[in-house]
Image (spheres, grey):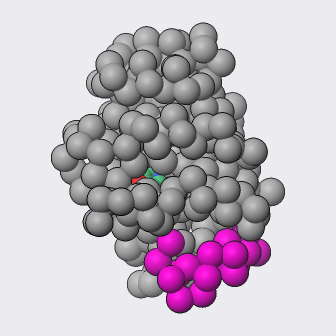
Amino acid sequence: MTKLSVNINKIATIRNARGGVSPSVLEAAINCQKFGADGITIHPRPDERHITKKDVYAIKPIITTEYNIEGYPSVDFIKMVIAVKPEQVTLVPDGPYVITSCAGWDTIKFQDYLKEIIIEFKENGIRTSIFVDPKLAMIEGAKLCGTDRIELYTEDYATNYTEDKEKAIAPYVLCAKKANELGLGINAGHDLSLENLAYFAKNIPNLAEVSIGHALISDAIYLGLENTIQMYKRLL
Ligand code: PXP
């Protein structure tokens, strides 16, 4: 079954709005796991506008499922992730000040760069995933980078889902088949929601994990965190 990793960045965004400690990201992570999440994802950024460096370390001991740290592999990020040793690191190519991840890696142009970084994480026992657009050449490139998994960037799917879901998912199915053929694990994320998740999960062969933040935390405002997590889980 596909695992649900809950991205708790938005909890930190609300906390930081008042500069205090509430709502607590630790309590959120503990509760997400208690309510059925199969993992916790965070995306620390250099400006610490949501998850802070302190959070990255503080969350680790309360993880009972899987810890996934996403981010741009700067020297500081690599050092921090190796010190924390999460189960998985997801490498994203975005610069420090983008609002949210907005593109996958060019796994051909940055192959040597990614290869070296991936080796370092793997030597430290950390599973690697790299964020990619749904393009066959990028999947083949990812394989050559030596990564364990890819994370399919699902914004295009989510945007086009309402208009034509079959057309929206087609490139993702092709890429997933290619990834399966090459022995790459498949994760996915970005803009997945209660509306579009089930169709994605049903059509992507061997989807190992989805990481969901914005829509899930927004739904939880109205539906409650426990109920929301259970609803997402049922769709998987
Ligand atoms: N995957 C990556 C690489 C991301 O940067 C994000 C957003 O932090 C997500 C998945 C989750 O996206 P969303 O918040 O839209 O669910």
87 over 154 or under it: above or below: above
Can you see residue 199? Answer: no
Image-based side of 204 in relation to 119, left or right: right
For residue 232: magenta? yes
Measured as percent of width and height from the top left, residue 177 is found at 64, 46
For residue 20: magenta? no
Given residues 106 and 22, the one toward you in this image is 22
8 over 97 or under it: above or below: below
Q: Ligand 1 quadrant?
A: bottom left
- Magenta stretch bounds: 217-236
Residue extending furthest toward the front: 20
Q: Quadrant of residue 195?
A: bottom right
Given residues 60 and 82, the one toward you in this image is 60
Given residues 92 and 230, the one toward you in this image is 230
Instruction: Please count the marks in the image.
Output: 0
| Residue name at image x 54 percent, y 72 percent | 216
Image-based side of 31 in relation to 171, left or right: right
Please state, as top left, top right, bottom left or bottom right, where the C terminus lies in the image: bottom right
Given residues 167 and 39, the one toward you in this image is 39
| Residue name at image x 30 percent, y 45 percent | 48
Measured as percent of width and height from the top left, residue 147 is found at 55, 26
Residue extending furthest toward the bottom: 222
Can you see residue 42? Answer: yes
Image-based side of 122 in relation to 80, left or right: right
Measured as percent of width and height from the top left, residue 170 is found at 52, 63
Image-based side of 130 in relation to 159, left or right: right
Measured as percent of width and height from the top left, residue 136 is found at 47, 41
Please state, as top left, top right, bottom left or bottom right, where the N terminus lies in the image: bottom right
Residue extending furthest toward the left: 97
Q: Main secondary structure of the magenta part?
A: helix
